[in-house]
Image (cartoon, rainbow, N blue to C red):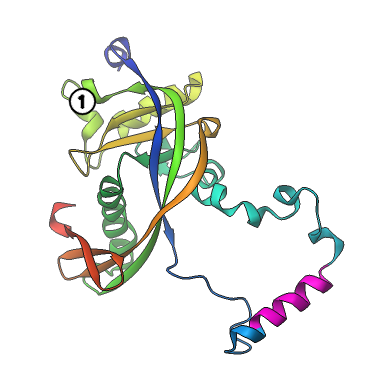
Amino acid sequence: MDSLFAHLTLADVHRSVIRNVVSIGTSQDLFDDLTSSPAEWAMAQQVEDEVKPPLYVSRTPVIHRPFEDAAWANAIGWPFKHWQRSRFSDGSFGVWYGCDSAETSVYETAYHWFNGLLSDAGFEKEKVVGERKLYDVSCDAALLDLRPLTAQHPGLMHPTDYSATQSVGARLHREGHPGLVTTSVRYAPGTNYAVLNPAVLSNPRLHCQLTYRLDGQHIVVEKQPGVMWMDVATAAL
């Protein structure tokens, strides 16, 4: 691994990166189990607002009402508070993953959805629907660029063995590097960004919402309900 770091260069990144996260298709009103009338939902919400204790009336809502900062939490903050094992982490620290395009993010997340969540639950042969939300997130950082070195170091692109990449991530975390850029393993034309420092990420904006439909040996991806946008073969994941 020393030979890898001896030849690394920096990528000066100043661009929007796609973050693809689990979501729901439509918002659910908190009072829809009490009445089917939207007008009565609004009235109930007004009553709730009037009787809320002082804690909920704050000049610093990001502290006292952190749910109002949901876009930042969903698009940026989550992996830094909920550490998980991943390609560049052994689970002892958080890594944020983003992609150069919505298409790359679909292949990356479809792989983990099908081979992780669904396969672990025994649902890979069932008809399953999943909802996703995509954000544009600004990334401004000098990131280590692994792309020119993937041919010489095949462990960087192994589809299932993360030992090499986790050792890279561990060193970056230990030495305080903000992150790296690398070629997507799941979608050859694509590029992935692995960020270890949330300070280099900002300005999350909704990009689009997607529906994943597992049907047989395909995952059909929709931007509009009932209209296929992408067709991902599970055999290729």
Residue stretch rendered in magenta on the structure: 41-52
Location of mark 1 (residue)? 150
In the rendered image, which quarter is residue 193 located in? top left
The reply, left or right, for residue 197 in relation to residue 114 is right
**Residue 151 drawn in magenta:** no
Mark 1 falls on what kind of element? loop
Q: Residue at x 18, y 38 (%)?
A: 189
Coordinates of residue 224 in the picture (x, y in percent)? 30, 67
How many marks the image carries: the answer is 1
Coordinates of residue 149 in the picture (x, y in percent)? 22, 20
Quadrant of the frame with the N terminus = top left
Identify whether 216 is placed above or below 138: below
Identify whether 124 is placed above or below 115: below
Coordinates of residue 99 in the picture (x, y in percent)? 33, 41
The reply, left or right, for residue 132 in relation to residue 82 is left
Rate crowding at label 1 as few (under 14), some (14 to 19) or many (20 or more) other CA atoms within 10 Å.
Answer: some
In the rendered image, which quarter is residue 43 located in? bottom right
Q: Residue at x 25, y 49 (%)?
A: 103
